[in-house]
Image (tube, rainbow, N blue to C red):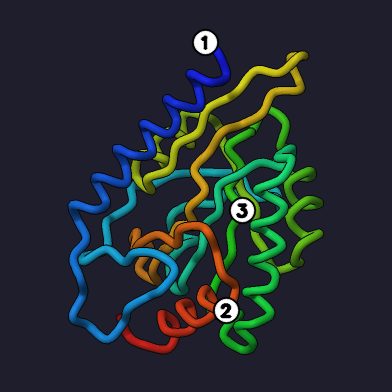
Amino acid sequence: MSNRLLSWGLLAGFAVLIGIVAGLVVLRPASVQIQSGTLLQQARPIADFSLNGSDGKPFTKADLAGHWSVIYVGYTHCPDVCPTTLAQLKAVEKGLGEDAGKIRFIFLSIDPERDTPEALGQYTHYFSPDFLAVTGPNAQLDVLGANLGFVYAKVPGATPQSYLMDHSSALILINPRAGLAGYLTPPFKTDALVSDLKQLVEKSW
């Protein structure tokens, strides 16, 4: 399969997921409205999963409870979008001030073949020592992708180890009850992201 066909297939899959999300979303009359994406009318439950943290410990659904989480899907060999987005999230973390401690930023690698826990930790902590990094077997990633609404695909390179990974670019919002709450979608603006996340933290939604 050509790289172009893989990219089109990825885009088509993401379009289907966006359509599903759109069917679950309405204009909320509630006090929380965000600029950077979409909140679901009702948070969607997430099935249990088991991933590996960069600290060598298991990372499960229980680790998402008790705080807001922002998940970014990517991989350490990403040439452009991933480091750019993580650098922007670092600026968002700084802009949140005291509220930063109430939100977890999680880098979810969809490249377990190359992204060992050690490599993930080194890469992610370059941007912020407080960012978390996790990955897991493709079977677990596929199930989690179906739950959270992200897709990914390997794009072969010139050598077996020079492949790229196409992946969804939206940030995934998880509420303190470990439910899927919505998506923050590019193009990202740091000030808007900070404002939106402050709202979510400060208001009981």
Asked whether, in this view, residue 45 is left or right of residue 161, the answer is: left
User: Under tag 3, what secondary structure?
Assistant: strand
Using the numbered discs, state the Cα–Cα distance from disc 1 to disc 2 in whole angstroms: 41 Å
Disc 3 residue type (three-letter): Phe
The answer to whether the residues at label 3 and label 2 have Cβ atoms under 8 Å apart is no
The answer to whether the residues at label 1 and label 2 have Cβ atoms under 8 Å apart is no
Using the numbered discs, state the Cα–Cα distance from disc 3 to disc 2 in whole angstroms: 21 Å
Q: Residues within 10 Å of mark 2 (few under 14, many from 20)?
A: few
Disc 2 residue type (three-letter): Asp
- Tell me which residue sits at (45%, 62%) in the image: 184
Q: Which residue is mark 3?
A: 107
Q: Is 73 rendered above or below residue 8?
A: below
User: Under tag 2, what secondary structure?
Assistant: helix
Q: Which residue is mark 2?
A: 191
Disc 1 residue type (three-letter): Met
Q: Earlier in the sequence, mark 3 or mark 2?
A: 3
The x, y position of residue 80, in whole percent, is 71, 45
The answer to whether the residues at label 1 and label 3 have Cβ atoms under 8 Å apart is no
Q: Which residue is mark 1?
A: 1
- Tell me which residue sits at (53%, 38%) in the image: 167
The x, y position of residue 169, in whole percent, is 52, 48
The x, y position of residue 48, in whole percent, is 38, 47
Front residue (pair 17, 56): 17
- Tell me which residue sits at (48%, 36%) in the image: 141
Using the numbered discs, state the Cα–Cα distance from disc 1 to disc 3 in whole angstroms: 28 Å
Q: Residues within 10 Å of mark 1 (few under 14, many from 20)?
A: few
Q: Earlier in the sequence, mark 1 or mark 3?
A: 1
Query: Which quadrant does the C terminus fall into?
Result: bottom left
Q: Residues within 10 Å of mark 3 (few under 14, many from 20)?
A: many
Front of the two marks 1 and 3: 1
